[in-house]
Amino acid sequence: MIHPATALRPVDPIVGMGVFATAAIPAGTVTWVLDPLDQTIEPQRLRRLRREWSRWRDHHTFADRHGLRVLAWDLCRSMNHSCRPNCAGTDLGFEIAIRDIRSGEELTNDYGTLHIAPREGFPCRCGAPGCRGVVLPDESATVRWTPAVRAALELAAGVPQPLAELLPLGWRERAEEDLRDEGPAPSRVARGASPPAAAEAEPRAEELAPQSSLSSSTIARPIPSPTSM
């Protein structure tokens, strides 16, 4: 489930729709939680789908670290990519704001953390400082954002958590355990500070689909993030 202070709005004719904050969301706020209405789809079920469903599979679901596709049920499916995202942590079963998000700002994450397949790569038009220019499978992406996620977890107890009832008991401790070996501990990150610039990737845009074919898939997160087939 996506944070309640969000709305679906147009980004531009190429990207399409995106998820925008309707109120300020402080760093450390959980912005999305995998909930019982979201579907996790096993590979054998995907293999039974007709070929024409492959486009919708790639567009409206994302892969988790166990090789399952997640099909979310709400507007988080329209959360777009940025090389300098303001949300991260998908593999933990939730996402958290890694910096303060202003009212009216688009919520984004790094699709490189979503275990995308080579066929899902696309030219990036996010325009962020350090933009990689192309989004491809990137095993380093999760490690790259781990310090920012860990810093955000340190702030979580001090900010409102509208999605708290969907989080399991001890969620922060479990997340910190999962992240322990993912990267270096952060230096204390100030509220509102920008996360580190993303690493450069070799451009191969000519081999990739246009971004519009994947926009709103961050999930396409289903909406998963999600998300029904």
Image (spheres, grey):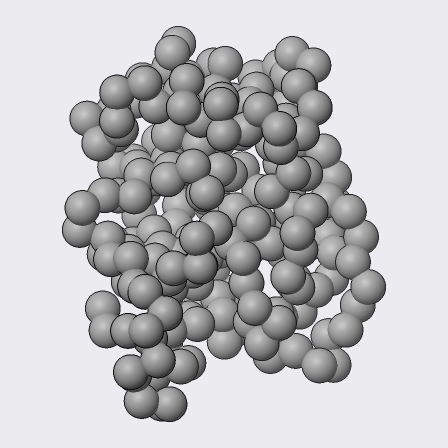
**Residue 63 picture location, percent across and down:** 44, 59
Left or right placement of residue 115 versus residue 199 in this view? left
Q: Is residue 196 above or below residue 44?
A: above
Q: Is residue 20 above or below residue 220?
A: above
- Taking the spot 38% from the left edge, 11% from the top edge, the residue there is 157
Between 89 and 31, the residue placed more toward the observer is 89
Q: Residue 4 sits in which quadrant?
A: top left
Would you say residue 188 is visible in this rendering?
Answer: yes
- Taking the spot 49% from the left edge, 70% from the top edge, the residue there is 214
- Taking the spot 79% from the left edge, 68% from the top edge, the residue there is 203
> Total marks drawn?
0
**Residue 75 picture location, percent across and down:** 29, 54
Left or right placement of residue 52 versus residue 135 in this view? left
The C terminus sits in image quarter: bottom left
Q: Residue 218 sits in which quadrant?
A: bottom left
**Residue 190 picture location, percent across and down:** 62, 14
Left or right placement of residue 153 versus residue 43 in this view? right
Between 188 and 142, the residue placed more toward the observer is 142
Left or right placement of residue 124 versus residue 162 in this view? right
**Residue 35 picture location, percent across and down:** 23, 43
Would you say residue 148 is visible in this rendering?
Answer: no
